[in-house]
Amino acid sequence: MNTLQCIHNRPLSSGRCRAALRRFPLVSGAALLLCGFPCAAQQPPAGGQNLTNLEGVVVNALTGKPIPRALVQVAGGGTRAMLTGPQGEFSFDGVPVGTTGIHVLKPGFSQEGLVNARSAGTVKVAAGSGKVVIKLMPEGVITGQVTDAEGEPLEGVQIMVMHSEIANGTRRVVPSGRGQATDEDGNFRVGGLAPGKYYLAAKAINLDRRVLGAMSGNRRQAYPSVLYYPAAPDLEGASPLDLTAAQHITLQMSLKRVPAFKLTGTLAGIGDWKQVNIPWLTDRSGQVLAMPEKFDRATGIFEFQAVPAGSYFLRVGAMGESNQFTWTQRSVAIESDVTGLRMVLGAGTSIPVTVRAEFSADHSSGQYRSFSTNPNAERTLARVQLNSVDSNEGLLGSAGGPSVSNFSSQTVNNVTPGRYYVQVFPQANGYVYSAHSGGTNLLREPLVVPTEGSVPPIEITLRDDGGAVKIHVNSSQPPVKAWAVLAPEFAPRQTPVLLNVEPGTDRLYGGLAPGDYKVYVFDSTDGLEYANPDVLSRYNAKAVRVSVTSGGTASAGAELIHREEQDSQ
Amino acid sequence: MIVRAAFCLLMALASSAQQGAKPSSAPAGAFQISGTLVDSTNDQPLAHARVAVAPVTERTAMTTIVTADDGRFVFPGLAAGKYTLTAQRRGYLTQSFNQHEQFSSSIVVGEGHESRDLVFRLSPEAVISGTVTDEQGEAVAEAQVLLFKVGGNGDTGVHIANRNVTNDEGAYRFGHLLPGKYLVAVSGKPWYAQSALAQTTGRVLSRINNTTATTTFSGDASREVTDESSPLDVAYPITFYPGAVDAAAAEQISLSRGDKAVADVSLQPVPALHFRVNVDAAVQQANVSLQSRIFDTVISLPTESHGVDRGKVTLSGVAPGHYTLRLNDYSSGQQRTLSEREVDVSGNGDLLSSQIQPLVPLTASVQIEPGVTAQGQIVVWLYDKKSGESFAERLNAQGAAEFSGGVPPGNYEISIRNASGAFLKSITSAEVKPVGRMLPIKGPGAVKIALVLAAGQARITGVALKDDKPFAGAMVLLVPADPAHNQVLFRRDQSDTDGTFTLADVVPGKYTLLALENGWDLEWTKPAVLKPFLPQGEVVTVLANGKQEFKLKVQQGAAPAPQP
């Protein structure tokens, strides 16, 4: 079955469709007309469903102008696709009545089709409904030039564009698009960027190797490993670029040579691993900043010949006999030559984890056996995740590194020295009653893993005697939907609960740990860093406090926070 | 002197030399190298360029200066010896003195040698840039752009020189190009392409199982059409600048020094084809990959292979064309090529794996004579110039290279890697008759080869003379007997400013030694081109560990190339 809408240079009766299709190419030529008639092969399976036509137009969200040759795909009866006509128009027949997935693609436009202004990705199809308008946001571009201190263009500088985004209430900075290098004139261009907040970094890894004679002699100077726009050594000091739709930002960066030093050392325990990668120097966000000039896999001896002064992490990945991949890292401060640095592979701290379930009810008929004090029995009671406080690896969202999860084992292995926020996720029943490591209350304080010595076990207690909260949203100008954020005041470092609420209707949510919560109700949580207590505290004036008790139901009448209004104040 | 590519030189690490206007690292002495750096196209002086000098015995010990406004450079206080001279300036190729390909002339410094007032000609680099557009004139992003160079290294072959990917505006750029002839090819996929087959594979396959719609075919690849095509199921054939689908119609881009050429390419979609290859029941995971020989390079093409379903692997989104099709088995976790075949794809259809040529299993057992030292694991290397394919295999614990996956039939040149200083003393086989270094492998039976690897590569030195005077910049060429079948035995050098040359790593055997003025553009790999020069050459019999010295008369190679 040909599941695609036919595009012809003239209308055809359905009987002639197949023959016409063989006479390709039909997509060429300027005048594209849509087949007004369904092709024989296009009839989707009937199956007793109510079917109707889906017609629409794809337009530029900024200018309202139609977008020809956009690819429209609809789900239902197998994916069907067609290109829009000269006026941005498309039509599919035999689309099931109801909600249908729709996807629109066009180079130069953000891929999230904004259907009917709001709900991306789906469209409500009713019999006899009018035309659907799909708005696509034009993408922006960042171009620029990188020069040296004298204004001479620098070729081969790696340009990284990172997008600042908020997922699950947490801000992350993720690499966006393909990294690329400056050309002979020091120029770069990063296109295809959706509107948003971006950071740009120039990495001058091994740039000196391109310069005749620069590697000779004692390399006492080198280009900085990384420079965030406009001239910061790290993400914290960088200026974000607010790129609007269709905007073209042009910028200039200048790299000045800085004092550089030698770093040599040994990876110990290399023989215990099946495969050992080349050690890297990274920054706090996991960006690779330098590769060693020399690395001997047999002895583990490495040598970086010219590392610009600064703080780094020395990091190496290794694969063990059972193919498990492990990162080992340590921080290194470079202020002068560093020689004889030793790092033992896989020698991070091991932290035992015990999970106690103090359940009052028998959940064994449910998802799994309860009252188990052994987290390995049957299933894991809770998952533990360690997020580094010192490195903002989590912020960059790259794989591996210091985020450590414990799914089923009783030990979190190879934890690099540093400070971690411990997130506990009950896997089926109960709430986190407590989480401690020695005297440290992990719900409030970070876990400190020292360079030397051990860490007391992480002891987690789950209970199932939680309470409920009933949320009522007070709003005079009701939106259709709102979102409630329940932030436990007794556990500021655990991710708050996010709930869908409908203004005017009570929303009941149970299984909460007893204690005091702040309840915030937002008209939108887009771009809201609600997992960050500092960000959430800005809305404290409109938050309500509830005390959840075991077995009880606390009521919270919350005021709707209009984000736009509030944020502009 | 062999430069070993300018970048190797630049990538070289660490030394004790100090950078600055006053050289201090080179051995102190009474001699100097001085001269003027000029643009090779107009002899205009080049100011503010970096010029580096280093003893040939320690090439990383560079002393670097920046040229004055008049392009002058001076390195005083040098001890007698040979030095390499290299220059770098933005917009120019980084080159050593009088550089040809990977060769240049060293500067000889000392009593009776003139090393002052040199004219160092630096070539401005050329650029090819362009835009790739589609059938509606819209930019094609993420298209793969391939740059090919015509000739070089004594050959007229057209080999890949670089690859690039178009940006969001469909633009690409190849910088730092030497003068010469180039070709541009683009491989891409329409951004809107929808493989109808990807969604209907199951249905189509079941129809085949019912044997209602397929016909058995024989001979070449199937032509049988089993599926309707769809307007969005399209592909771009490999397209050559300026818009040719046929490689023969590709247009050469001739670049002189410093040229900035623009090569825009427009892509036109054609209905995409798909075909199925049946596999043995034992094969659980397999895919089909496509290679296309473009000029003299084999390029892997992005393909949509749909995995094993009911005993067949399906490939979709293929533009009609001539391909090498490979069936790869992943069932063991590692890729193993089961078979391969050249196919003309002009219609949808099926291919029985029995119709794909099985590869010829090949084992090369290597007897290593005393004195051979290996740098890492020794590798046996096979190269078929006609197909452009090469195969490499490490020696196993039994001292054999097992090409267990097999190699396609072809005429292979055999060589050894990771055993510098050693050479192939003999090549014997019961199944094939080696001719020089060439192995004509026909199949289908397995082939066993016995190799003897011996130590003792030789060294030839000498001086090139013209009118009895030392001649700088000559191409010195060591030509093996039966050059057509012994291409790996050629050795080359460029004479230094005192006319001297060195040919290292020479395999014992019979040769003719030549010195040619203006020989760099000759197709010296072709016996017919060499023939007129051989009678005036020096016949040499090289013995193991031999060290021989010659005085060579320089012959006129080609007429000097006119300056573009």
Image (cartoon, helix red, strand yellow):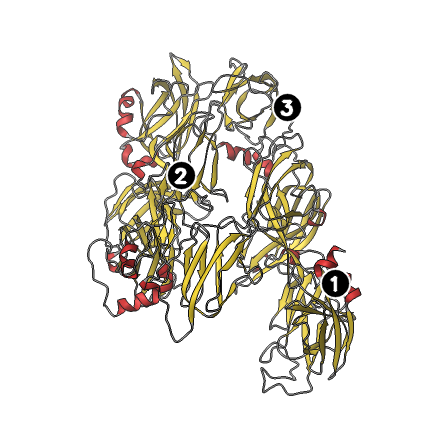
Question: Which mark is drawn over residue B136?
Answer: none
Please indicate, yes or no, whether residue B66 appears anywhere in the rendered image: yes
Task: Please report whichever mark, 2 or 3, sits nearer to the chain's N-terminal start.
Answer: 3
Residue that badge 2 annotates: B265
Q: CA distance from mark 2 to mark 3?
A: 50 Å
Check if mark 2's residue and mark 1's residue have beta carbons within 8 Å: no
Crowd band around label 3 with a 10 angstrom C-alpha radius: few (<14), some (14–19), many (20+): many
Q: CA distance from mark 1 to mark 3?
A: 63 Å
Question: Which mark is drawn over residue B23?
Answer: 3
- The image shows residue A196, relative to residue A157, as above or below, that is below
Tell me where residue A108 appears, x and y as whole percent.
51, 48
Question: Which mark is drawn over residue A536?
Answer: 1
For this rendering, which residue is in front, B498 or B525?
A: B525
Tell me where residue A415 appears, x and y as whole percent.
66, 62
Is B404 placed left or right of A141 in the picture?
A: left
The chain to which mark 2 is attached is: B
Please indicate, yes or no, whether residue A344 appears anywhere in the rendered image: no
Please state which of the two labelled residues, at mark 2 or mark 3, is closer to the viewer. 2
